[in-house]
Structure formats: structure tokens, C-alpha cells
Amino acid sequence: MNRRKFTTGMLAGAITAAVAVRANATQPVVTGSRNVVLVHGLFAEGSCWSEVIPGLQRAGLNVTSVQNPLTTLPDAVASAQRVLARQDGPTVLVGHSFSGMIVTEAGTNPNVTALVYVAARAPDAGEDYTALAKTFPTPPASAGIVFDGDEGRLTEDAFLRDFAGDLPVARARELFAVQAPFHKDLLAGKTAHAAWRSKPSFYAVSTQDRTIDPGLQRYMAKRMGATTIEIEASHLSLISHPDLITNLVLRAAKQAV
């Protein structure tokens, strides 16, 4: 091979490699789970994940936020299971607050490869969560729950102070305006299974939480052997610190194969 042909070939190879690097830089590569299913808890609805969803989508993940009916635990689990059934391949199931109950039950789905709890309930199979919670200090938000017949909700003062305490007041009031009421029957449900006993689990503790006691969160995270982070946040860390929650979900997705 003469020198001109050799040099031209080397240059062409370098250009091809450079183009490939640039292409890879703009096309995210998902090496673990390709799907994320997000579930909301009490006093909220599906859009509460709006600060987390874009980062997950930029990473190349298919993301779905479940609209929890907040009626009964079986209804809530069924709503998540219907969404899980639509996923193509490995899926990370993420729950905030009350929906940790749903993650714990629906997470037994064979497509679910990892669980993420965000300041969430994480009961054992058949456990009375209310009885467990009573062994820890009563969170201030509990006093702000009011009922209209069988429907419960947080007062505006409790929502702003105890649920969304680290958010700008204007943002917290927006979230209060779309607060979805829950039915009393929802609180009576118990999980029949504990998916965290067999699935990799991750937990984000909110250290300034006034809705679920931080000590209770730490207890549940430790009991399940979860990969745990602590965030100096209110109950709504998914809104006040979305990057930290996004990164935790991405860690779960990469671990799940």
C-alpha cells in the first residue's frame, strides 16, 4: 500500500470514528430496564412527577405516570398492574408516599426488576401499616386531614406547611389546587405480598418530612436492605429535589437487568 492510500485510509477511519462518537453522545443507551412506571400517593395526582419525568426521558427511558384512583388498595394496585402490563420488557416501579403500598404489592409483577420508594410506605406482607406508624412520632400533617363524608383531603394550611413545606408558596398552592381526595376505604388495605423481599430496592428518605416520620422511613429502608439516600427535603422531594430522585431511579434502572 502506498503512503497516500495509507494516509487517506487512516483519515477516513478517524472521521468515521468521530462521527460515531458524536452519534453516541446524542443517542442515550439504556443498559438495564427500559421502562419506568411512577405512582403517586395521597393528596396528589399523576402530574406530581412532572419534574422527574423529563430527566428520565432524556436518559432514553419510557416513562408512564399512573393515575391512582385513591379508592381502595385493590383498585389502586389494579391501576398500576394495568400500566405494568403495557410495558415492553424490564421495568422499574417507583412510588411516592402512600403508593409505596402499591409498589410493594404490584412489584411482584415479573416485568418489575427494581423498586424505588420516595418517602414512601413500605409494609411487609400482611402488616398493619397504621400500627407500625404508631410506634413512631405522629407526623404533623395527620392533624390537617379533614373528611367530607368518605373523602379525605389536607387543608390548605397543612398542605403548604406539612406536605410541601420546602416549595415556594405559589408552587405549593398550585399543587393544592389539583389535590385529589382519597376514600377512607383506601387506608384499610393491607398488602398480601412484599415485593421488596425479592427485588432490588432503593429508598429516598426525606429528612424534613412532616407527613411520614423520617425515623419510620429509615426503619423501613433498613429493614428492606434498600440502597438509601437522604435528602434534606419535605415530603415532596420529587418536586423540590427532582435531580436527586431522577438519579436514584436511573441507578435502579441500570442495576435491573
Image (cartoon, rainbow, N blue to C red):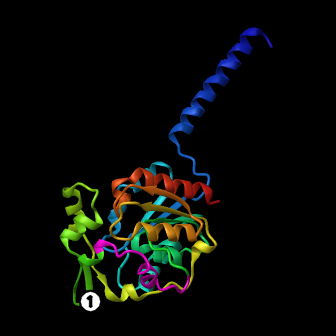
Where residue 87 sits: x, y (%)? 53, 67
Q: Residue at x 29, y 73 (%)?
A: 141
- Where on the picture, by quarter, is residue 9? top right
Q: Residue at x 55, y 74 (%)?
A: 107
- Foreground pick, 121 / 21: 121
Residues rendered magenta in the picture: 125-141
- Where on the picture, by quarter, is residue 193? bottom right
Q: Callout 1: helix, strand or loop? A: loop
- Foreground pick, 128 / 13: 128
The N terminus: image quadrant: top right
As drawn, is 212 to the left or to the right of 159? right
As drawn, is 117 to the left or to the right of 154? right
Q: Which residue is mark 1?
A: 150
Reply yes or no: does residue 126 show up in magenta: yes
Question: Tag 1: residue type?
Answer: Asp
Reply yes or no: does residue 64 show up in magenta: no
Q: Residue at x 42, y 79 (%)?
A: 133
- Where on the picture, by quarter, is residue 161? bottom left
